[in-house]
Image (cartoon, rainbow, N blue to C red):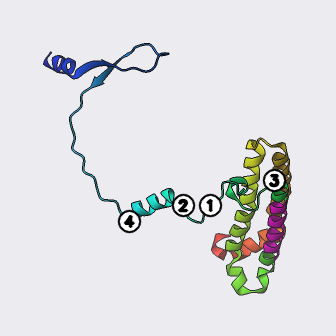
Amino acid sequence: MLARTARNALLKPSSRFRGCLHAKRNVVHVASRSASTVTLPASVDDIALVSLFDQPKNGFKSSPFAYTGIFGHPTLISPNAFTALADATLLRAQLLTERILRARESRDELFKVVKNLDRLSDMLCSVIDLAELIRNAHPDRLWVDSANEAYEKLCEFMNILNTHVGLYELFFRTLPLSNH
């Protein structure tokens, strides 16, 4: 009974004006114990973050009329540029694939096979993922079509890599014999 009396004493009905369109509502606030807060001085990281967000430097163009491209990528200023990015990525991926396949010729390159396969995957997936986002979320049909083309082109190449016997054999050749 004493607890109920104390709780009722802490409950204070109050109302606030929420505009002409809202009916008057009573809001009940529960009084809480006062707590003391201690303000810590800003750390070096805190100061760096504040300056980064409050005073951006060369990361952005100063002119409000400067166009940076989609997602701030300076070369992606048109759907044709996206197609060019996919073509350049495909060419780089083909060159890296050839390098991986030639790894048998050099012991140093054999040690780099797994790392180069990871680089190849990152190279393809970064553009494929971007194409996937654009083709599903962009409102402009030209961008969507360009993203579809890039997606299909790079996924087709990735499927070829996934079934490439030479890459498979080379990968297992680089693994220690105990893992076979």
At label 1, the amino acid type is: Phe
Relative depth, front residue between 80 and 137: 80
Residue drawn at 83 percent across, 55 percent down: 150
At label 2, the amino acid type is: Pro
> Which of the marked residues, 3 or 4, is nearer the chain's N terminus?
4
Which dot marks residue 60? 1
Which image quarter: residue 25?
top left
Which dot marks residue 56? 2
Q: Is residue 163 visible?
A: no
Q: Position of residue 18 (x, y in %)?
A: 43, 21
> Which of the marked residues, 4 or 1, is nearer the chain's N terminus?
4
> How far is mark 3 from mark 4, CA to CA?
43 Å
Q: Nearer the viewer, mark 4 or mark 1?
A: 1
Q: Is disc 1 in contact with disc 2, using a CB cutoff of under 8 Å? A: yes
Residue ID for mark 4: 44
Q: Is disc 4 in contact with disc 2, using a CB cutoff of under 8 Å? A: no
Which dot marks residue 132? none
Dot 4, crowdedness within 10 Å: few (<14), some or many (≥20)?
A: few
* Circle 4: element type: helix
Q: Going by the picture, which residue comes out furthest to the left?
A: 2
Relative depth, front residue between 12 and 136: 12
> Which of the marked residues, 3 or 1, is nearer the chain's N terminus?
1
> Which of the marked residues, 4 or 2, is nearer the chain's N terminus?
4
Q: Which residues are magenta?
A: 84-98
Residue ID for mark 3: 151
> Which of the marked residues, 2 or 3, is nearer the chain's N terminus?
2
Q: Please state, as top left, top right, bottom left or bottom right, where the C terminus lies in the image.
A: bottom right
User: As displayed, is residue 140 above or below residue 73?
Assistant: above
Residue drawn at 81 percent across, 46 percent down: 144
Q: Position of residue 176 (x, y in %)?
A: 65, 76
Q: Please state, as top left, top right, bottom left or bottom right, where the N terminus lies in the image.
A: top left
Main SS class of the magenta portion in the image: helix
